[in-house]
Image (cartoon, grey):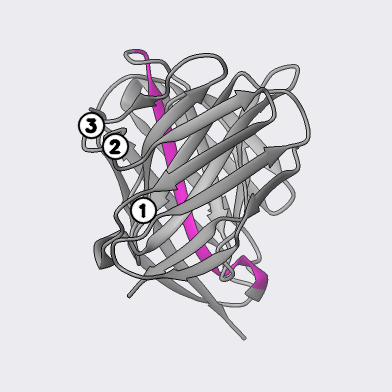
Amino acid sequence: GIQVEQSPPDLILQEGANSTLRCNFSDSVNNLQWFHQNPWGQLINLFYIPSGTKQNGRLSATTVATERYSLLYISSSQTTDSGVYFCAVGGFTGGGNKLTFGTGTQLKVEL
Amino acid sequence: SAVISQKPSRDICQRGTSLTIQCQVDSQVTMMFWYRQQPGQSLTLIATANQGSEATYESGFVIDKFPISRPNLTFSTLTVSNLSPEDSSIYLCSVYISGASWEKLFFGSGTQLSVL
């Protein structure tokens, strides 16, 4: 199956700082999504982005499918951004709707 | 988005017993997905539940251990059988919701299972 690696595994930021999270995957995909799991465990869907660039407020994401990676940018970070960020991918084989989750990036934003 | 109600939100169970988790969605969906998140780990897909047919299980998960029901297009249950401490995890149901140019996976709030 598809392997999904995220980096860095852990990240500590001061409030107001910017960051870039990376997701590398091992095969062609037709589905890629980014999630935020808040400290209470709830998973929030941030982006559906199998290719191209999207922005939503302070967050933006870019997927370069031909090079098998995606980036999540967080600007002007806030303490509420803390939690774990997962990318998840679906491949052409087995149906793109079955997502394989990455290893996650644990983010802590401090005052 | 979708409203996905999952219950119980948490439970503590004895070894050898079973726990049934319910997932209710506020709209009709073709597929429902059950995931497991072990402590400090990522999410792993257990199975895909389609209405009117048997669930499709991923490698490493079997129907005897994780029986699933899907009686209609808005409801599903996952049972975790013959519990052992290794089953202590968060179990999550999820569904796809589509827009004009997107198809996003949304999750319920999860069931935190602890096995003693």
Q: Give left or right: position of A53 versus A70.
A: right
Q: Secondary structure at mark 1?
A: loop
Quadrant assignment, res A8: bottom left
Q: Callout 1: residue from which chain? A: B
In the rendered view, would you say A100 is above or below B49? below
Q: Amino acid at mark 3?
A: Ser
Crowd rating for badge 1 (residues with CA inside 10 Å; few <14, some 14–19, many 20+): some
**Disc number placed over residue A4 in the picture, else none:** none
Separation (CA) of disc 2 from disc 3:
14 Å
Which residue, given by chain and number where applicable, does mark 2 sit on? B64
Q: CA distance from mark 1 to mark 3?
A: 16 Å
Which label's residue is closer to the chain start, 1 or 2? 1
N-terminal-most mark, 1 or 3: 1
Q: Identify the residue shown where x is 54% and y is 39%.
A: B77
Q: Secondary structure at mark 2?
A: loop
Instruction: List the residue tagged with mark 3.
Output: B59
Magenta residues (range): A80-92
- Please give the chain letter of the residue carrying mark 2: B
Badge 2 crowding class, 10 Å Cα cut-off, few under 14, some 14 to 19, many 20 or more, is few
Which residue bears the numbered disc 1?
B42
Question: Where does the C terminus of chain A fall, quadrant-wise?
Answer: bottom right
Amino acid carrying label 2: it is: Asp
In this rendering, position of residue A60 left or right of residue B44? right
Mark 1–mark 2 distance (CA, rounded to whole Å):
24 Å
Label 3 crowd bin: few (<14), some (14–19), many (20+), radius 10 Å:
few
Label 1 sits on what residue type? Ser
* Label 3 SS: loop
Q: Confirm whether residue A78 shows in the render.
A: no
Along the line of sight, the residue nearer the viewer: A31 or A51? A31
**Same-chain status of marks 1 and 2:** yes
In this orientation, does residue B12 appear?
yes
